Image (cartoon, helix red, strand yellow):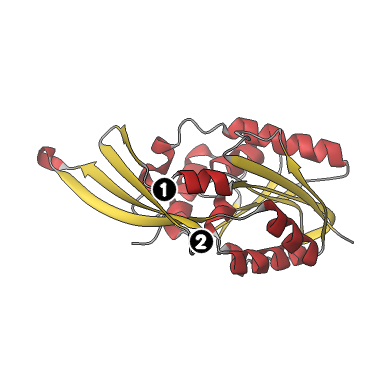
Amino acid sequence: MSAYEALAPWYDAFTRDVPYEAYADFYEKLFRERGGQFRLLLDLCCGTGTLALIMAGRGYDMIAADASEEMLMEAREKAWARGGDCPLFICQRAGGLDLYGTVDAAYSSLDSLSYVPFEELEECFARLRNFIRPGGLFTFDLRTPEFLRGMDSSASVDETDGVLCLWRGRYDAGAGALRYGMDIFERVEGGLYERSNEEHTEYAHEFGAVKAALERHGFTDVRARPDGPMAGRDRIHIECVRGE
């Protein structure tokens, strides 16, 4: 099963500790530092749409893209229940991004681009060059290679109301990627559990290689930001500008 199919209905329950408001604050801080108008935004790899809805609630016009139909369905249901201005949700993978015009800024949160192989990451940057206006901002965060390598042979269990998730990681040095299987046990009628599983892969993107790729595709002033949410040894935030 592909990533974020079985997990989609439970994703929010398992990520209740994610500081989404801090991410929104951080992006607005970057906008203020850069000056200019940042009103139309792209949330790339938006997942279940929590951050896109927060940004919409702060007055931004939002386009939110994700490759998972299941995650987007969760996002749309959340948006309908919330009411008010709703982001435009589109089902597109990062390397296949195709918008109708340009946005003022794009962001990708929670190491979503770590899931993209390097060749497709290059294509993603090339497409973003077309769809972010000149002088516009692009920011995203990645898991560090050190973190991914350190997760080799790791395992964890997470449990919330009615569902249990078993996580097992294996680092593939040849591919430069952490592969982890997830077994999801959902309690069903009669006290039994229904099992589903899926596999995730996160790639160990080195900052130097990512910076060079961004610059090849017309992005300038590429910086690693130490002040982003959950930044540290495990995560790096990157900020850059779409060149003229």
Q: CA distance from mark 2 to mark 1?
A: 26 Å
Quadrant for the N terminus, please. Answer: bottom left
Please tell me the numbered disc located at residue 167.
none
Mark 1 = which residue?
A: 152
Given the image, on which type of amino acid does mark 2 rest?
Ala
Can see residue 82?
A: yes
Q: Earlier in the sequence, mark 2 or mark 1?
A: 2
Choose top left, top right, bottom left or bottom right for residue 233: top right
In this view, the residue farthest toward the left is 190
Nearer to me, 49 or 219: 219
Mark 2 = which residue?
A: 67
Q: Residue at x 61, y 31 (%)?
A: 21
Q: Nearer the viewer, mark 2 or mark 1?
A: 1
Residue 5 position in % (x across, y down) = 37, 56
In this view, the residue farthest toward the front is 173
Q: Residue at x 34, y 45 (%)?
A: 167
Q: Residue at x 44, y 44 (%)?
A: 151
| Count of numbered marks | 2
Residue 98 position in % (x across, y down) = 65, 68
